[in-house]
Amino acid sequence: MGVDRVMSSRILATGDSLSDPEAAMSARRPFPVRTLMVCFTVWLIATEILIFDQIKFDAKAELLEQAARAFPEPRVMVPTERPSNLSSGAKMERL
């Protein structure tokens, strides 16, 4: 019962009624500017980290591409006929 009186006296400190909109507005806490600043700072730092990480990734990818271009092209031998994977008893005919 005592808790109810404390809460009601906190809300109605000036003696206003609950139906009065100005009383409800005056009972509200102020906007947490510090919390907003902390959240914005964390977001800004995280965004910068992501941007710099992307820049580092792009630079490393470019270096890797340059290194790959420096090597001579691999020479691959392409067989002209397909190898026979048939069992030893099977016969193969050419068309």
Image (cartoon, grey):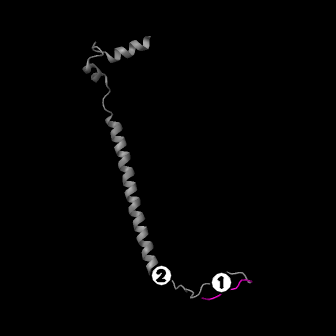
Q: Which residue is mark 2?
A: 71
Q: Residues within 10 Å of mark 2 (few under 14, many from 20)?
A: few
Q: Quadrant of the N terminus?
A: top left
Q: Which residue shows up at 36% across the image and 37% down it?
A: 35
22 inside magenta stretch: no
Where residue 61 appears, as percent x and y from the top left, is 43, 69
Q: Which residue is mark 1?
A: 84
- Look at label 2 and name its amino acid: Phe
Residue ranking furthest to the right: 89
Q: Residues within 10 Å of mark 1 (few under 14, many from 20)?
A: few
Say which of 86 and 22 sits in front. 86
Image position of 60 with respect to 27: above or below: below
Q: Which residue shows up at 43% across the image and 68% down it?
A: 60
Magenta part mainly helix, strand or loop?
Answer: loop
Tell me where the magenta segment starts and ends, as one range.
89-95
Mark 2 vs 1: CB contact within 8 A: no
Relative horizontal placement of residue 14, taking residue 84 as reference (left or right): left
Q: CA distance from mark 2 to mark 1?
A: 34 Å
Where residue 87 appears, as percent x and y from the top left, is 72, 81
